[in-house]
Amino acid sequence: MSASFAAAAKPFGGFDFNLRGKTPAEQIYCIDGIGFDGITMWINNAADLAILEACQKAKPDLKLIAALVGPTVNKPESFDREHMRQLASKVATMQGEIWLIIQKPKDQPEKALA
């Protein structure tokens, strides 16, 4: 799970891409009790959404600060409207936000996009 954690006094927190634990429950346990207010994580597909749901099952009062969604410019297939509808419903129940981060094509890193 890739996630960032936000402390109550520091709403953006730090990034931790190597959480201890193999399951979402173990990963949430490793940050529980150290003062973080919630998590921010990439949720680009149904598998990512399932990870969020597993984290919420492990900690029902888990706060989602933001769900990051990163479609690629010039690749409409990278944006799944049905996934966004499901994600919006889930995020609304957690009082979080969705951050849409438009990404440039990885195969054209130097080319300017119009």
Image (cartoon, rainbow, N blue to C red):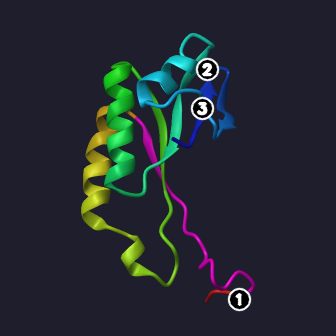
| 10 Å crowding of disc 2: few (<14), some (14-19), many (20+) | few
Of labels 3 and 1, the one closer to you: 3
Task: Please report whichever mark, 2 or 3, sits nearer to the chain's N-terminal start.
Answer: 2
Residue 44 location (% of width, % of height): 42, 57
| Discs 3, 1 touching: Cβ within 8 Å | no
Identify the mark at residue 111; answer none if there is no mark: 1
| Discs 1, 2 touching: Cβ within 8 Å | no
Identify the mark at residue 8; answer none if there is no mark: 2
- The answer to if 42 sits in the magenta stretch is no
Residues rendered magenta in the picture = 96-110
Give the residue at x 31% y 49%.
88
Distance, label 2 to label 3, CA atoms, is 20 Å
Of labels 2 and 3, the one closer to you: 3
Give the residue at x 38% y 40%.
51
Q: In which quarter of the image is the C terminus?
A: bottom right
Residue 3 vertical placement versus 114 (above, below): above
Which of the 4 image quarters holds residue 89?
top left
Residue 70 vertical placement versus 61 (above, below): below
Of labels 1 and 2, the one closer to you: 1
Residue 19 vertical placement versus 72 (above, below): above
Three-letter code, disc 3? Leu
Give the residue at x 31% y 25%.
57
Distance, label 3 to label 1, CA atoms, is 35 Å
Give the residue at x 40% y 80%.
76
